[in-house]
Structures are given as C-alpha cells and as structure tokens.
Amino acid sequence: MAKTVEELAQLVGGRVIGDEGLVITGVSGIKEAGAGEITFVANRKYYCLMDKTQASAILVPPEIKSGKRTLIQVDNPSLAFARIVS
C-alpha cells in the first residue's frame, strides 16, 4: 500500500490534521491497529479508543478536531475506510 496521509486524504476527500507526509502501509480495526496503519472511528462510543490505539492515523468525522494521532476528517469514516481498503 505505502501511501502518505495526504494521498489518502485526497483519495477520500478528507482534511488532514497532523503529519501529511506520514506513510501508511496498512489498514486495521481500531483495537488491532499498529504503527504504520490507518483505522477509523465512526461511532461516538469508540471515540475513547482514539487515545489507546497504536494506529498512526485515524479517519474521523468532522466534529473531531484534534487527537494524539494524525487525523483525516471525512463526512463518513466507514465509507472512507472501505474506499482505502479497496
């Protein structure tokens, strides 16, 4: 895969908050994700996992403005994640 966060944001029509040059090499669920991977949160009940995940980047809805990881704000994180996976 090996794409930058900026490239992925362009693919899904998102806005980057954080390191645009960060290289992402894989995808995973928020609980399983590790360094170099991107994940997503689409449901408020999982927002608490954002600070615990080891993912390098997270696809998030627009209301999330900051976090410990690089974020890509999108209207529909689930759909954006599916697009990146395919």
Image (spheres, rainbow, N blue to C red):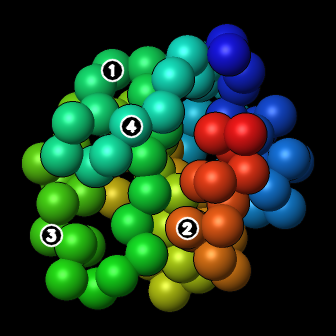
Which quarter of the picture shows residue 6? Answer: top right
Quadrant where the C terminus lies? Answer: top right
Residue corresponding to mark 4: 28
Tags 3 and 1 touching, CB below 8 Å: no
Type of amino acid at the residue the image marks with label 4: Ser
Residue 21 seen by the camera: yes
Identity of the residue drawn at 44% across and 28% down:
37
- Compared to residue 6, the image places residue 11 above or below, namely below
Tag 2's secondary structure?
A: helix
| Camera-side mark, 4 or 3 | 4
- Compared to residue 52, the image places residue 76 above or below, namely below
Type of amino acid at the residue the image marks with label 1: Ala
- Whole-Å distance between the Cαs marked 4 and 3? 17 Å
- Whole-Å distance between the Cαs marked 4 and 1? 10 Å
- Whole-Å distance between the Cαs marked 3 and 2? 17 Å
Residue corresponding to mark 1: 35
Tag 1's secondary structure?
A: loop
Residue 78's label in the rendered image is: 2
Circle 3 crowding by C-alpha within 10 Å: few under 14, some 14–19, many from 20: few
Circle 2 crowding by C-alpha within 10 Å: few under 14, some 14–19, many from 20: some
| Camera-side mark, 4 or 1 | 4
| Camera-side mark, 3 or 2 | 2
